[in-house]
Amino acid sequence: VQLQASGGGLVQAGGSLRLSCAASGRTFSSYAMGWFRQAPGKEREFVAGISWSGAGTYYADSVKGRFTISRDNAKNTVYLQMNSLKPEDTAVYFCAGRESGRLTIVRREYNYWGQGTLVTVSS
């Protein structure tokens, strides 16, 4: 499985962006998917996750109520809608796939990673 993240860019504080992660392969619909981010000088951290069916989602406290993860299994794509962006959201955002369909916040439990897309939020 190959993952391709896109949709990053420069946005002012309070603005919105939607990230997309397109997956190759016919098994995407059985994978749990997650979004992580890594700011300069910091470790990669969990942002949001979604189960294989989309019925289960989970968010980091720092983005709860502002970000929404969703997926379209027919299009092999997972999305991260980011609203009310803050300067501290600035990071490279990575999508990740887990062969087990159950979502997890643990980075090492994901099997596949995209290349990352940069989000910069100006104050």
Image (cartoon, rainbow, N blue to C red):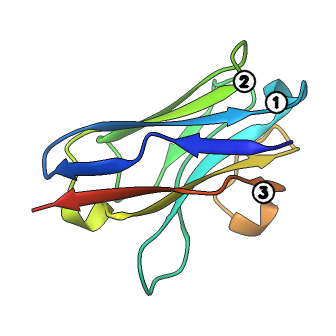
Q: Residues within 10 Å of mark 3 (few under 14, many from 20)?
A: many
First in sequence: mark 3 vs mark 2: 2
Q: Quadrant of the N terminus?
A: top right
| Circle 1 SS class | helix
- For residue 106, the mark is none
Residue at left 23%, top 58%?
A: 121
Q: CA distance from mark 2 to mark 1?
A: 6 Å
Residue at left 60%, top 31%?
A: 78
Q: Position of residue 98 (x, y in %)?
A: 80, 48
Q: CA distance from mark 3 to mark 2?
A: 17 Å
First in sequence: mark 1 vs mark 3: 1
- Residue at numbered disc 3: 110
| Circle 3 SS class | loop
| Circle 2 SS class | loop
Q: Amino acid under label 1? A: Phe
Q: Position of residue 99 (x, y in %)?
A: 88, 44
Q: Amino acid under label 3? A: Tyr
First in sequence: mark 2 vs mark 1: 1
Q: In the image shown, does 11 or 52 lie closer to the viewer?
A: 11
Residue at left 29%, top 59%?
A: 120
In this view, 120 is above or below 52: below
Q: Tags 2 and 1 in contact by the CB under 8 Å rule? A: yes
Residue 29 lies left or right of residue 51; in this view the side is right
The quadrant in which residue 51 appears is: top right
- For residue 28, the mark is 1
The single residue placed furthest to the top in the displayed view is 74
Residue at left 41%, top 47%?
A: 8
Q: Amino acid under label 2? A: Asn
Residue 119 lies left or right of residue 53; in this view the side is left
- Residue at numbered disc 2: 76
